Amino acid sequence: MENLVKELGEDCPWTKEVSPTVMLGWLKSECKEVASEIREAIKNPSSNLTSLKSELGDILFDAHMLNSICSRTFSFPPTETFEMGCKKVERRTPYMKSWGDGRNAETMEEAERIWQEVKRMEKKEEETVRAEDETSPSTGIQSKISNMCSNFDLDCGTNGTLLIASAWAAGVGCGVLGFRYLQIHAASAKSAA
């Protein structure tokens, strides 16, 4: 499947153009179809599972496609998501003999409790790092945006940097073209003043 998705990403015009949001919609749609097939299999245990297996294959395909499209759109290696996913599961299952820390989980409930406990600790650590990033001038978003502005010879000033940082945090992209646009408008505003 990995090779199939890679080939589609390189040679299929639809795959080259589709956005992560559109692909996510397809994945959600397939999840609904799988839910329907699972309900049917539970109602009729002797039923043919071909449809369920086919729909599960669609989910796997769409998940791989979404990963590939996000990788292309946001410029990260597609393998990073697999590595991060594996590491997360290993951290949250420390009772496993192959990689665990010696904790023990004999029941589903114990495994769930440990998973949630580790997840809470991870979230708390993420919030601490995020709070440090927001208050630290060397690592904060505002500082990063200010540096990007200066790379384009754009003097945003404090208010401009805050505006761009706010847009970025809200999910509004400010790529190279966005910075060039701001650079042109900043220059024309300076000359008008």
Image: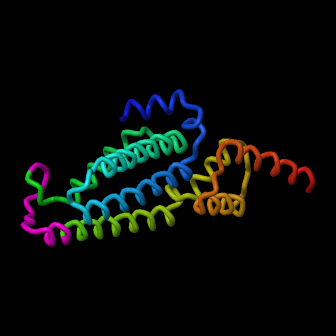
Residue 106: percent from left, percent from top:
6, 66
Residue 89: percent from left, percent from top:
25, 55
Q: Nearer the viewer, residue 41 or 89?
A: 41
Identity of the residue drawn at 44% across and 31% down: 6
Identity of the residue drawn at 41% across and 31% down: 4
Q: Is residue 27 left or right of residue 14?
A: left
Magenta-colored span: 98-113
Q: Is residue 75 left or right of residue 188?
A: left
Q: Is residue 49 above or below residue 166?
A: above
Q: Quadrant of residue 126?
A: bottom left
Residue 65: percent from left, percent from top:
45, 42
Quarter containing the N terminus: top left
Q: Is residue 139 above or below residue 117?
A: above
Q: Nearer the viewer, residue 80 or 147?
A: 80
Q: Quadrant of residue 156?
A: bottom right
Q: Which secondary structure class fits the magenta region best? A: loop
Q: Nearer the viewer, residue 97 or 56?
A: 56
Confirm whether the magenta stretch covers residue 157.
Answer: no
Confirm whether the magenta stretch covers residue 110.
Answer: yes
Residue 54: percent from left, percent from top:
35, 46
